Image (spheres, grey):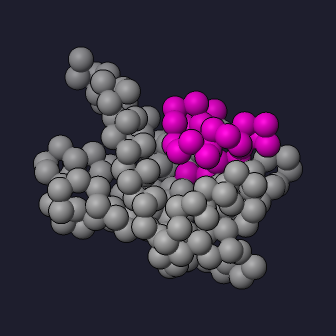
Amino acid sequence: MKKIILVLVAVSILIAGCNFFPEPEEDLTGFKDCKQSQECIMNSVKNCEKAFASSKDTFMGDAKAELKVIVYGMQEGNCKIKYKTGNLEGDAGLMSQAVFSLIANKEMVCLVPKEKINLATKGMNEELMKNYCSGSLIDAINSIEETMKDMQ
């Protein structure tokens, strides 16, 4: 069940990565604006170049999920990447709505060593999130996993 929740969260993040639009909350002067290009943000992650992208794309059913990604570049030997979820708008079904409500408006910062940057270019995965990321989004994912474990 832990894997199912992780997959749901990862899929929601990856699906949200399909259409980008600039809507940064912080001053990103000097950062590349990837607009609607998933290839652009993935190349920026791969090269650890300063860039940002925001998306709002179909999550499940008629629902739209928000995700913001900011690549800050190399910092002390690690590539710093922030992922921030927004709201879910529309009808995604009861289970999906419940899961997404737990991860909505949360963020995580990943400090990925240069030699492990390929993990980040493959989308969110368990190894990346467990070993290199921290923040309220990771806390929410862990909480969901614990709840699912208790239900078994």
Q: Position of residue 142 (x, y in %)?
A: 43, 35
Indicate whether 81 appears above or below 64: above
In this rendering, the count of numbered labels is 0
Residue at (77% x, 40% y) in the render = 113
- Residue 94 falls within the magenta-colored stretch: no
Q: Does residue 131 appear anywhere in the picture?
A: yes
Q: Quadrant of residue 129?
A: top right
Q: Position of residue 4 (x, y in %)?
A: 32, 30
Indicate whether 43 appears above or below 121: below
Q: Position of residue 52 (x, y in %)?
A: 61, 69
Indicate whether 18 appears above or below 143: below
Residue at (23% x, 53% y) in the render = 60
Is 94 placed left or right of 53 in the picture? left
Q: Quadrant of residue 29?
A: bottom right
The segment highlighted magenta reads 108-131
The C terminus lies in quadrant? top left
Residue at (61% x, 64% y) in the render = 40
The N terminus lies in quadrant? top left
- Residue 112 falls within the magenta-colored stretch: yes
Q: Nearer the viewer, residue 94 or 51?
A: 51
